Image (cartoon, helix red, strand yellow):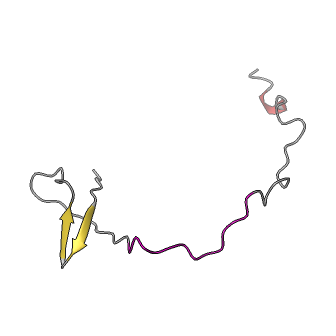
C-alpha cells in the first residue's frame, strides 16, 4: 500500500502533518520538493500554435470494412 503524507523538513527532522496508517514499522521514501519561492523561468507556450495542423479524414465515422462481419 502506498500512502502520501505531507510534512516539512526542519533542523534535521521530518515533521508529518498527520499520523501514518502503520502499526509497527514500514519502509518510507522521502522526496524533497524544493523551495516554494522558485518561479518558472522557461519560455511560455503560445496558445493555439498547433491550430489547423491536425486534420480528420472525411470518412472518419464510416464503418470499417474489416468489421462488416460483426455489424
Q: What are the residue bounds of the magenta stretch?
A: 34-47
Residue at point 21%, 57% (across, down): 17
Query: Among all residues in the image, which is located at the extreme bottom?
Result: 11
Residue 26: where, in percent of width, then height?
Answer: 17, 60
Q: Is residue 1 left or right of residue 62?
A: left
Q: Is residue 61 left or right of residue 8?
A: right
Residue 32: where, in percent of width, then height?
Answer: 34, 72
Depth check: give the residue in front, 43 or 66. Answer: 43
Task: Please say whether residue 29 is one of the residues in the magenta stretch.
Answer: no
Picture mark count: 0
Depth check: give the residue in front, 25 or 53. Answer: 53
Residue at point 73%, 59% (across, down): 47
Depth check: give the residue in front, 25 or 46. Answer: 46
Residue 56: where, in percent of width, then height?
Answer: 84, 43
Q: For the stretch drawn in magenta, what is the main secondary structure?
A: loop
Which quarter shows the C terminus? top right
The quarter of the picture where residue 20 lies is bottom left
Depth check: give the residue in front, 62 or 18. Answer: 18
Q: Is residue 11 left or right of residue 57?
A: left
Task: Please say whether residue 37 is one of the residues in the magenta stretch.
Answer: yes
Residue at point 61%, 75% (across, down): 42
The quarter of the picture where residue 30 lies is bottom left
Residue at point 18%, 50% (across, down): 21
Amino acid at each position: 500500500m502506498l500512502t502520501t503524507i505531507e510534512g516539512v523538513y526542519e533542523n534535521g527532522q521530518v515533521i508529518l502533518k498527520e499520523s501514518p496508517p502503520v502499526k509497527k514499522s514500514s519502509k518510507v521514501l522521502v522526496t524533497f520538493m524544493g523551495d516554494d519561492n522558485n518561479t518558472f523561468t522557461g519560455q511560455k507556450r503560445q496558445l493555439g500554435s498547433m491550430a489547423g495542423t491536425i486534420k480528420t479524414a472525411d470518412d472518419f465515422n464510416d464503418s470499417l470494412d474489416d468489421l462488416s462481419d460483426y455489424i
